[in-house]
């Protein structure tokens, strides 16, 4: 039987040991990295991963600085236009807005919290998620606005359904899950459709919980009360999810209507859903897209299956979009008693609200509720040009005379931060990795691995004799008992085993054990590992693979009766037959056992070997018979 399985691809390029031209460190370029660079027509890297990462971070800082500079310049231009257009309005000072009585309604938006040092912007919510959050990646990659966080609720209506439900996308998922196969089940069809719609399903399933978790961590970040003179014991229509207005200005909670829900959780205020989303119908355009030219599927049955899968993706998207839609009519009906109580209101003060169209229905309801009162005065706090533009558009939909409207500026409010109220919630970051230290049995050599770094130490002389970096996190590193070689194990999305050897009185990088397709599926079947000076052998239930320790090449890949396998004159490293451990766990166990567990010398005449139905027997020179290699 040939050593290699027929049809295996030709040998991949061997990993390389290179010197970073920036820091002078040794780094390992693995074979998969070489393949990626080759496929893209790029030259192989000349700097190590740490220097490349540092250079990337520096470029990102410079890009961020340039972006911040452009943003500041844009804001300066907008503020200049804002102050110029204010000249056409009746502008009053905040200090001069003193309500005559308690017949006043305060309408509060997120700007109110921001004025009091609360980190409640949607950018802060983004930062709380972390860069590796599935929710954040879905929002930033499958929603179309360039900056989804600038106007988050409205932006939720603009998702890229083509990137989820396009024919070529859905066809790829159906093919990946073998849903086109004659023997395919309905489950494969539905799994493929859900995989295609996964980004919007992720937002549906995670946004509410992640958002509430962030809201519950918000705190006031100042002791200042910049709006003290504005507040009396009136009524409050609060669009925020926090109850800060009660604590900051002594408003009775019975006077406050949290129109989109409140984070407070007690007997009188049960844990209610926080309402977050866009206007009804705002997402209709998202379902309209032009299909790209697409090669037809192979037969009418597959065409029908593809169209049905697309319909399923669109249905999942529509159901998910419904959870991100504010049905203002239903919300207003739920709080009808509060709106009825507004009859008699004389003064309405709007603070920190962007006046976005998504909330215009509420303003229309307020205007209708106070229409019976004469001489109602409206005061709108404006922070910038967008607020003013939204106000101009809003007044066009309400029956309010411009002469009844006054504007006060809020862009000049400054407060003194205190404590941790103005710090961002902690973001869980990827660990740099646990440090592993392993020694050879003779005490001369030791390996120390942490993160992406490997060091080999001469313990007798107390110095590092070899150091290298790899691009992936090192899960473990261990040294053979006699100190002949070091194995470095990498797990995760790009697993592998790197090999280092001691030759000519120095340590050197040997290579990476040649990969096998679908290795992750084979690992649970690993039974034993054997080692000689030249080879390392992995024994599975019905297959044996032997690697050359001089270069990491696969030199033998044989199918055998399970487990009718024998290797003579080889040292046993570890037996997995009882523990049923995975291959990628063997280094953890390796150092816990005595590695120099030699089997008695076996007869070299293979005719003496006696195989019987899954058990291995070795006939020794002393005619002693041993059972299978079980601990």
Image: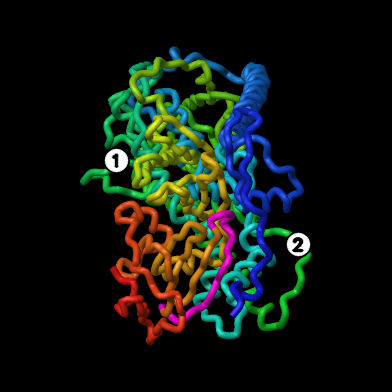
Q: What's the residue at 49%, 41% (across, down)?
A: 452
Asked which colour scheme the image uses, the reply is rainbow
Against 288, is 232 above or below? above
Q: Residue furthest right?
A: 293
Q: What's the residue at 47%, 29% (across, down)?
A: 111
Q: What's the residue at 38%, 60% (across, down)?
A: 573
The answer to which of 118 and 245 lies nearer the viewer is 118
Which residue, given by chain and number where applicable, does mark 2 sit on?
292
Q: Secondary structure at mark 1?
A: loop
Tell whether 10 sits left or right of 243: right
In x, y percent, where is residue 489? 46, 51
* Picture mark count: 2
- Image mark for residue 264: 1
Q: Secondary structure at mark 2?
A: loop
Local packing at callout 1 (Cα closer than 10 Å; few below 14, some 14-19, many 20+) is some
Task: Name the image quarter holding residue 243.
Answer: top left
The answer to which of 458 and 427 lies nearer the viewer is 458
Image marks 1 and 2: residues in contact by CB distance under 8 Å: no
Q: Residue furthest front?
A: 622
Local packing at callout 2 (Cα closer than 10 Å; few below 14, some 14-19, many 20+) is few
Against 358, is 290 above or below? below
* Residue 376 visible in image: no
N-terminal of the pair, mark 1 or mark 2, is 1
Tell whether 292 sits left or right of 452: right
The answer to which of 475 and 575 lies nearer the viewer is 575
């Amino acid at each position: 039987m040939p050593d290699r399985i027929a049809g295996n691809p030709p040998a991949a390029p061997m990993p390389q040991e290179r010197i970073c031209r920036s820091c002078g460190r040794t780094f390992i370029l693995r074979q998969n990295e070489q393949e990626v660079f080759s496929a893209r027509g790029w030259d192989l890297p000349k700097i190590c991963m740490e220097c490349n990462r540092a250079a990337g971070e520096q470029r990102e800082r410079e890009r961020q600085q340039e972006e911040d500079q452009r943003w500041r310049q844009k804001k300066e231009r907008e503020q200049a236009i804002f102050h110029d257009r204010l000249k056409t309005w009746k502008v009053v000072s905040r200090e001069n807005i003193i309500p005559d009585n308690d017949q006043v309604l305060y309408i509060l938006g997120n700007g109110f919290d921001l004025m009091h040092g609360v980190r409640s912007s949607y950018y802060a919510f983004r930062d709380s998620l972390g860069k590796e959050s599935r929710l954040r990646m879905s929002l930033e990659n499958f929603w179309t606005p360039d900056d989804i966080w600038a106007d988050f609720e409205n932006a939720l209506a603009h998702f890229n359904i083509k990137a989820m439900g396009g024919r070529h996308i859905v066809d790829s998922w159906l093919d990946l899950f073998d849903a086109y196969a004659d023997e395919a089940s309905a489950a494969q069809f539905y799994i493929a459709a859900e995989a295609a719609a996964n980004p919007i399903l992720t937002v549906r399933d995670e946004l509410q919980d992640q958002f509430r978790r962030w809201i519950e961590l918000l705190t006031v970040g100042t002791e200042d009360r910049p709006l003290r003179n504005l507040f009396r014991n009136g009524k409050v229509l609060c669009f925020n999810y926090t109850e800060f207005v009660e604590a900051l200005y002594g408003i009775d909670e019975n006077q406050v209507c949290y129109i989109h829900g409140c984070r407070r959780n007690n007997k009188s205020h049960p844990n209610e859903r926080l309402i977050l989303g866009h206007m009804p119908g705002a997402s209709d355009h998202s379902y309209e897209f032009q299909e790209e030219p697409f090669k037809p599927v192979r037969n009418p049955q597959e065409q029908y299956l593809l169209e049905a899968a697309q319909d399923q993706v669109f249905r999942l998207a529509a159901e998910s979009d419904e959870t991100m839609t504010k049905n203002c009519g239903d919300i207003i009906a739920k709080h009808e008693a509060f709106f009825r109580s507004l009859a008699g209101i004389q003064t309405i003060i709007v603070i920190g609200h962007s006046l976005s169209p998504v909330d215009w229905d509420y303003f229309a309801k307020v205007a209708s509720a106070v229409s019976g009162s004469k001489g109602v005065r409206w005061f709108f706090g404006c922070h910038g040009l967008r607020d003013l533009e939204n106000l101009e558009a809003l007044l066009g939909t309400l029956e309010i005379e411009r002469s009844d409207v006054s504007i006060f500026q809020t862009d000049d409010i400054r407060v003194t931060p205190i404590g941790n109220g103005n710090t961002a919630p902690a973001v869980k970051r990827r660990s740099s990795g646990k440090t592993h230290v392993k020694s050879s049995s003779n005490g001369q050599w030791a390996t120390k691995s942490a993160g992406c770094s490997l060091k080999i130490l001469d313990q007798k002389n107390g110095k590092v004799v070899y150091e290298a970096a790899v691009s992936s996190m090192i899960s473990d590193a261990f040294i053979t008992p006699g100190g002949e070689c070091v194995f470095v194990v990498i797990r995760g999305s790009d697993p592998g085993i790197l090999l280092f050897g001691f030759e000519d009185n120095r340590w050197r990088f040997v290579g990476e054990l040649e990969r096998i397709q679908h290795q992750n599926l084979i690992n649970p079947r690993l039974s034993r590992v054997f080692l000689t000076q030249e080879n390392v052998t992995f024994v599975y239930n019905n297959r044996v693979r032997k690697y050359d320790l001089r270069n990491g090449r696969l030199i033998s890949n044989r199918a055998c009766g399970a487990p009718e396998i024998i290797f003579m004159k080889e040292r046993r490293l570890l037996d997995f037959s009882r523990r049923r451990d995975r291959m990628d766990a063997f280094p953890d166990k390796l150092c816990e056992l005595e590695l120099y567990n030699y089997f008695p010398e076996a007869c070299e005449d293979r005719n003496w070997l006696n195989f019987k139905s899954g058990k291995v027997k070795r006939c020794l020179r002393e005619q002693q018979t041993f059972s299978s290699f079980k601990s």
